[in-house]
Image: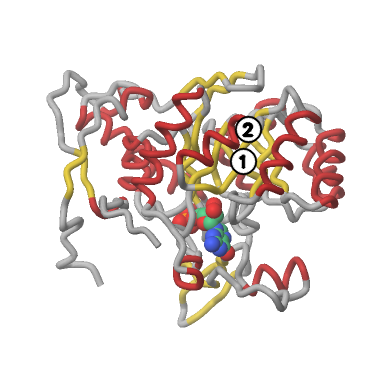
Amino acid sequence: MRIEYDIKLGFKDVMFRPKRSTLKSRSEVSLERQFKFLHSPETWTGIPIIAANMDTVGTFEMAKALSEKKLFTAIHKHYNLNDWRNFASTLTNETSDFIAVSTGIGESDSEKLSKIIQQNPNIKFICIDVANGYSEHFANFVKQTRELYPEKVIIAGNVVTGEMVEELLLCGADIIKVGIGPGSVCTTRVKTGVGYPQLSAIIECADAAHGLGGQIISDGGCTTPGDIAKAFGAGADFVMLGGMLAGHDESGGKIIEKNGKTYKQFYGMSSSTAMEKHVGGVAEYRASEGKTVEVLYKGAVEHTLQDILGGIRSTCTYVGASRLKELTKRTTFIRVNEQENKIYSK
Ligand code: 5GP
């Protein structure tokens, strides 16, 4: 047994130190980024915020709304080929630039992936997603997928340490998804004791990925626009959101009316709700590692997006970054023991 004593930080442990700036207004800040990739010859330009591949968030409807603002959606893996065919008939070239097809690492997953890609050759991104990205089988699946799709941008995860980021990039991934346990409906840390505070995971994994010419996605744990800004400040190239995009018209999940208020159901992808829905129950050898919650209905996602993008633009003006790309260079975090003043919160 060994203990690492240096403290690992989460979003709640830091704030940005403001810096002198020549920017006059938030409207001068550009949140678009342009990326080239380690393996894929594609390039991508857009606002690097991603709707998570959860069936209550990464829906076709969400993809349409987000792509209009140049944000990205990792479409969840539970749509069947027929759903994809219907969606494809409405798919514009612009939307196809802003979506990834998600897949697990089973044989049936790779067959379905190949059919979806055959049907929709314009889709450029594949997201290979497992809860625990440390298995050899996963790394081999990434290698195989790279061989099969040399042109596609491959996202792979989830991991939280630099050495595994490097390994997956060398196996053929372009972008590594980072996060174990920070998610709003995740119970991994409670059920297993495994995890890594997200801000430190980003700092360490970004360093490893950028050293090799790859990128990272910070996945999970953002509860406010300020958290998203902190993830970018720490070095994330992309930030993936689940809970912050749940509860909208474009989100999946049942509508629930209770005490005169409207809610939408939101649940983790390994919650018993999801497992009952998609695989007919929780397998005996595993525990559910996700929660099911009800989130207040929030209307159209475009209002939430405005709030998020406005917040990040404002962060950039506070530290003097005229483009999102500069945010991390302009970032000095201070360690704190306080965040918001809650005197008037319920
Ligand atoms: P959020 O933005 O809601 O904090 O986090 C979203 C992320 O939580 C997802 O992208 C995914 O990585 C993770 N997640 C989703 N469902 C589950 C689950 O059932 N269990 C665990 N451990 N993580 C989940």
**Which residue position is annotated with label 1?**
156
Q: Quadrant of the N terminus?
A: bottom left
Q: Earlier in the sequence, mark 2 or mark 1?
A: 1
- Dot 2 amino acid type: Ala
Q: Position of residue 151 (x, y in %)?
A: 73, 22
Q: Position of residue 233 (x, y in %)?
A: 32, 35
Report which quarter residue 24 is drawn in. top left
- Dot 1 amino acid type: Ala
> Taking 111 as reference, is 326 above or below it?
above
**Which residue position is annotated with label 2?**
173
> Taking 307 as reference, is 93 above or below it?
above
Q: Quadrant of the C terminus?
A: bottom left
Report which quarter residue 311 is drawn in. top left
Q: What colour scheme was applied to this rendering of the protein?
A: secondary structure
> Taking 343 as reference, is 240 above or below it?
above
Dot 2 and dot 1 residues touching (CB under 8 Å)? yes
